[in-house]
Amino acid sequence: MTAWNDLVSTVLLGTRRRTLDPAGLPHGIREIAEQRAEPAEQALVAAAAYTGYRRAGQRPLTGVDPEPAAAEDNRPLIPAVARARLVHLLSANRPELVEEWLATVADKGFRVPAERLPALADAARTRVSLRAPLAAVAGPVGAWLGERNPDWAFLVAAADDTSDDAWQFGTAARRQAWLERVLVADPARAREALAAAWSTEPADVRATFLALLGEHLTDEDEPFVEAALGDRAAGVREVALRLIGRYPDSASGERMIERLRACVTVRSRALRADVLEFTPPEPDDSLIRDGIRVPPGPGQGTARLRAIIAAAPLRFWAELGTPGELAGMLVEGPPLNVVRESWATAALRQGNEQWAQALVEAEPSGRSTAALIGVLSPEQQAATVAKLTRGLPIEALTRLILDLPQPWPAELGTVLLDWVAGQRDHRLVAHAAALIAKAVPVACLGHPLAEIPLPGEAAPWRRAVAETLSFRREMHKELA
């Protein structure tokens, strides 16, 4: 039994049941213990000294090279008041405000004190949305930390590395950062590297890389995107279907139009509204090439029709009527909601404002309404939501507000704050108002909701809205 185990057993059992033999202790500890006459006192003193010895009583290592220092970061530090704000943000557990604060710091070209980076990195471990702004703010010090702590590896992507080694041998985060940078700095090189590695990448990586390419899409990328439609992974095909919609004259789109033309007609009825008649498309193995794979089972015809409508260029429908006319027509064949949802998917993929507006007006409380509003221009978003605040039931309206894609334009933020200001106390209003206060853009933070003093009997949620708006306004002022 080692000297430490012998000492622990003696202390736990007591010196009446077990005797400590000081001869087995390390030299320095034995000298300290032998200065005590009582066996119990001798054991306790030895245990205290041995504990410190085990923690720090080791000879220094020799022949070890010190860690190289992080590269110098010449960006200015955030102002002192902003440093105090960061401490408050970290202790208040407000991750959505931490994300906004980091994005603002990065945009202003500041850096944070190095001693705050570990706490921020730990917060980003469990909240992925913090990683990109933190990596930008952390700079070379963050990359240095990420290389030494695997839990913070996402910080390594902040290094401005465009070398081939980063692409060939880097982590997933580092390779993604490389592709993002090189698509801007050297597009031809980035596309060549992506094409060469494509067939060996895992499905989730292919989907991520294809989505990154979509942020820099050009006419030359059409063949690559069309080839991805036949990918074996559903996630990759979904990204490819979304991107191919940006090519209104693509070969895939032409094939979809021909399939759709054989499935739909308009039947006119005297003194009554026209009807869109659909017939389910026949099974067609060539659909696989265009990214459409329908699993076997009941309803295959409707599933194929849904996929074809969603993938066909919306210019096809001009042969049959305007978006407003078609969205309001009766439907025979598939359920009406199937057709409208398919049109909504097509409008989202192709970014078609006219169709998005028509579908919102046809079904204001539809499942895709919030996403379709995001397709509209800032002015039209504000006008459409203002109209919906006057017509939708509170349940449908709050659900819509929670689903509106962010970031919101200032025009929309003002409409939503005006709506909050005019509402009575209601739990659903309180829920929506909390999101609105956190999501409106900086230009809206001077709204009267944050300026006008509230009466003492004001509901807690109203005070929370005012406090959030004021807190955010001060936060941005400190970094101005």
Image (cartoon, rainbow, N blue to C red):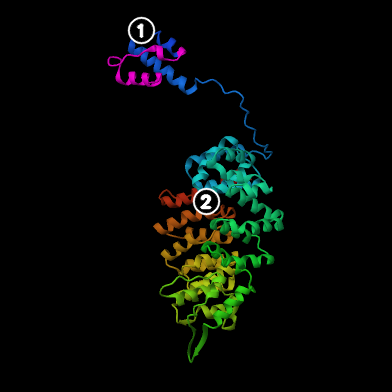
Structural distance between the alpha carbons of marks 2 and 1: 73 Å
Give the structural element (helix, strand or loop) at label 2. Answer: helix
Q: Amino acid at mark 1?
A: Ala
Q: Are marks 2 and 1 in contact (CB under 8 Å)?
A: no
Image quadrant for the C terminus?
top right
Which residue corresponds to the image point at 46% horizontal and 12% vertical from the top-left?
A: 27
Magenta highlight on residue 10: yes
Circle on res. 450: 2
The residue nearer to you, when weighing 297 against 210, is 297
Residue 80: x and y in percent read 60, 36
Residue 169: x and y in percent read 62, 47
Q: Residues within 10 Å of mark 1 (few under 14, many from 20)?
A: few
Q: Is residue 51 visible?
A: yes
What residue occupies the far left of the structure in this picture? 17
Image quadrant for the N terminus?
top left
Q: Residues within 10 Å of mark 2 (few under 14, many from 20)?
A: many
Residue 444 position (above or below residue 232): above
The residue nearer to you, when weighing 39 against 129, is 39
> Disc 1 marks which residue?
37
Which of the marked residues, 2 or 1, is nearer the chain's N terminus?
Answer: 1
Residue 445: x and y in percent read 56, 52
**Which span of residues is magenta-colored?**
1-28
Give the structural element (helix, strand or loop) at label 1. Answer: loop
Which residue corresponds to the image point at 54% horizontal and 56% vertical from the top-left?
A: 204
Q: 271 left or right of 11?
A: right
